[in-house]
Amino acid sequence: MEIARRLLGRHAEQEQMRVLLGHARNGRGGALFVTGEPGIGKTTLLDTTTASLPGMRLLRVNGFEAEATIPFAGLQRLAIPLRPHFHKLPENHRNAMRIAAGAAEGAPPDRFLVGLGVLGLLAAAGDAEPIACVIDDAHLLDSESLDVLGLVARRLEAESVALVLAARDTSHLEAQLAGVPVLRLAGLEPEWALRLLTASLPDAIDPAAAAQVVAATGGNPLALVDLASELSARQLTESSLADEPLPIGHHLETLYLRRIRHLSGDLQLWLLLAAADSTGSIDLVRAAGHALGLPGDPVEEAESEGLVELGRTIAFRHPLVRSAAYNAVQGAQRRRAHRALALAAEELGLLELEAWHAAKATLGTDPDVADRLERVADTAGRRGGLASRARVLATSSSLTPPGQVKFTRLVAAAEAALASGAAQLAKSYLDDVDEDALDPISRGRLVSTRASIALFTADPALMEAGAQMLAAAECFHGHDVALEQDALIKAFEYTLPAERLAQGLTLSELGARLHKGAELRQGTAGTILRGLSAHILLPYEHAVPLMRSAVDTILALDAAELLRYGATSVALTTALWDATARRECLTRTATAARDAGALQLLDSTLWIMSLAELTGGTPRHAHQYIEQVRELRRAIGYDAEHVTNVALLAWAEAPRPQVETIAEGAGAMGFGGVQSAGAAALAVRDLADGDYEQAYRRLKPLIEDPFLQVTPLEVPDFVEAACRSGRAHEATSHVTHLEELASANGSPWTQGVAHRSRALIEEDAEPHHQAAIETLTPTDLDIELARAHLLHGEWLRRNRRRRDAREHLHTALRLFEQGKAPAFAQRARAELSAIGDRQPARGSRDNLDLTPQQLTVARLAATNHTNAEIAATMFLSPNTVDYHLRKVYQKLGISSRRQLAERLGADT
């Protein structure tokens, strides 16, 4: 057996492991995902390269199948040796990890918040002593632990930590560990495979036959060693001459199966119990054996046969041995074993394990076992184990007799699966539900989940998502006011992405239903519904007080409530032209989502913030929020390179056909809001380029088919396009409308653009230009102010007042360059050139030889964010933030945050 423990060959693989471990010793963290077929040598590679780690601490955890449905079980075992460092974590990270471990009560933590806690914990431990963290059989870990370890693996950079995960080739694991460097083990090279085979055989083998055996096994080390132990050299020679190659996995399991069937009946039964349990608990298997009448405890005999290794737990020689032991008997005998294990688990107080074994022992349905599994699922949910909750509920449903309870459990499984990010799994659960068997509340939950899946997966069905949420609200009506009101708010939110493409409802129908829902109960949801219905139904001047009340309510919410209602603020604050309140609501919502680890909500909130910055903000800030989305996507293993805000592309001077193609593609998927935002942004780009006719043509359809809070923001651009393209008569009524809006909402933003628009249609324009500038100057609406200076400067130049024009044009140019609006900056530059003031294009502050990640760190540091705050924003450890900041200082030749702010500019 000793030859099986030696690592032959694998020089490149060993070197890759040594480099990873060496970097960790020197403060450069990293990760590696080692994968390959059973028996290929993953464990041997780990054993060999971590056998001696001077100056490092080894943390080793193996996956166990029985823990695969216990959320964070693997992670809990990993964290036990690191407890002395828990006090170094932020409080929200400590609390999340304690709740996930079942050691504290509280709101279920998001798995990604737990992940940030583990990242910080490993970083803190690495500061004391470099850490080598090795996870073998990772495919047997629970889903939550895998998600957490995937996040940690992707974010290790400047920590003294090396993380290695080894697992079989499985598609689900590759998805969960996407973005982690992969080391895929193939069979041994022929030279080393031949050495292994001949060294494992007691007798000599013909070299040609040996070469054929090596080829037949693909150089799989376990296959070579175990074939050598089972077959003689003569038998191997005969096998090598067969027409078909040896099927490694099946062939080895057959060999193990033959060995097991030659054992005594008592030992076969003991191996069956050990294989059926898979926790490795000697006490549990022993107790189950007693329940089945085993006269003794044949653990030592099992070890002497070379099938298991005994320590504190039972470890099968290889998963194929366990599989053979389990499959050596018929289904009835396996159920008998699980029944005995369930009884033993109950006696030992292992309630979750008892429920699982009872489920495995059940043929058909069993309401009592199904109820116990549901309680296990509820426990998983309280710990934040949504993926585990989904799977356990689905199993519970399968054991439940047909009827309402069965399908209600399947709906709950779909809700948990969707919340964990497994949208397709959620959809498959819902497809198996008999809707006619559901009670009204469960039917409403089903409809709501289907609508959410459409939005989550960008399915064209999202065009009906708003209508579906109205249908869900009708199901809740008369049964649960809170669910009904929340469904109505979501009906509004789900209508926004589709905009004019929304199907199954009209805005007036939506508004009427929101108004009806607002009257059901006073409170936060009722106030928000009242504001939303007023936004849709009432004349603007009458809607403003109700919308303002809703915004004030959202501004007063605590973090937990912001997670539910914060994103709704964007429509109301935009309708009020209140950029300050909009930014505050969204920033607080993003902070709440980040602190809670609710990364799906954070992702959508950052998207909204990026889009919002293009009206009432700056393209520079819009770009920064998109960079944060990319960092988030990288952290959770999603593709970050194709994250695109189509409207921002237009502002950034991307080729028009590219922007048009992306916008049209979004429309085809049902995202009418993205399509119209792209068209409106291209029209702004046309204005900047002086193509007023094209800007008019793009904006005209949007103005003629208005949509809620979106269209009024496009009116000032339409006024400019109409006036400059010879259609001033079309602009007059729209200018009046802007002034009426300003009178009703009192917003400096509305007042400023109304003055700016009035200047375009009046002969005596100067007072209106000046009023626009005076109104917008005290605000932080930099691009709107810049456009007011630009238009005034252009008017002054055309009236031969060059000196006055120069002052306004210089101000406009500075603001456009600071705000990253290159097309408008070029327009201002061209105007200055026309009066003999040639301004060279200024080099971008972003062109600083910094990576995107370093630039994001630099911007946040320049605006007085602490390292801990930057780490939370970018899903990194403070060590990595400090590392990037030192690199930034080195590249820029500076030594302080004050100098960094000066170098990047105050507009960061």
Image (cartoon, helix red, strand yellow):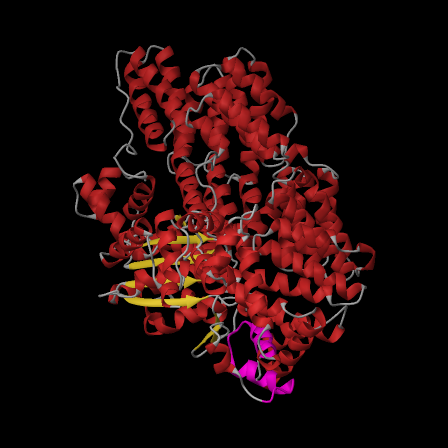
Q: Main secondary structure of the magenta part?
A: helix
Q: Residue 133 sits in which quadrant?
A: bottom left
Q: Residue furthest bottom?
A: 295
* Magenta-span inclusion, residue 771: no
Does residue 127 appear left or right of residue 660 in this picture?
left
Q: Residue furthest right?
A: 436
Q: Quadrant of the C terminus?
A: top left
Does residue 885 appear left or right of residue 508 in this picture?
left
Q: Position of residue 93 (x, y in %)?
A: 41, 65
Q: Position of residue 652 (x, y in %)?
A: 41, 27
On screen, residue 225 above or below 427: below
Looking at the image, which is closer to me, 250 or 197? 197
Q: Residue 816 sits in which quadrant?
A: top left
* Magenta-span inclusion, residue 276: yes
Q: Quadrant of the N terminus?
A: bottom left
Q: Position of residue 898 (x, y in %)?
A: 21, 46
Q: Residue 801 sits in which quadrant?
A: top left
Does residue 104 appear left or right of residue 669 in this picture?
left
On screen, residue 577 above or below 273: above
What residue sits 57% from the left and 71% below the top? 260
Looking at the image, which is closer to me, 278 or 228? 228
Q: Position of residue 132 (x, y in %)?
A: 32, 62
Looking at the image, which is closer to me, 663 or 27? 27
Does residue 475 appear left or right of residue 105 in this picture?
right
- Is residue 521 at all visible to an observer of this figure? no
Looking at the image, which is closer to me, 716 or 607? 607
Q: How many marks?
A: 0
Q: Which residues are magenta?
A: 268-295
What residue sits 50% from the left and 27% below the top? 681
- Is residue 460 at all visible to an observer of this figure? yes
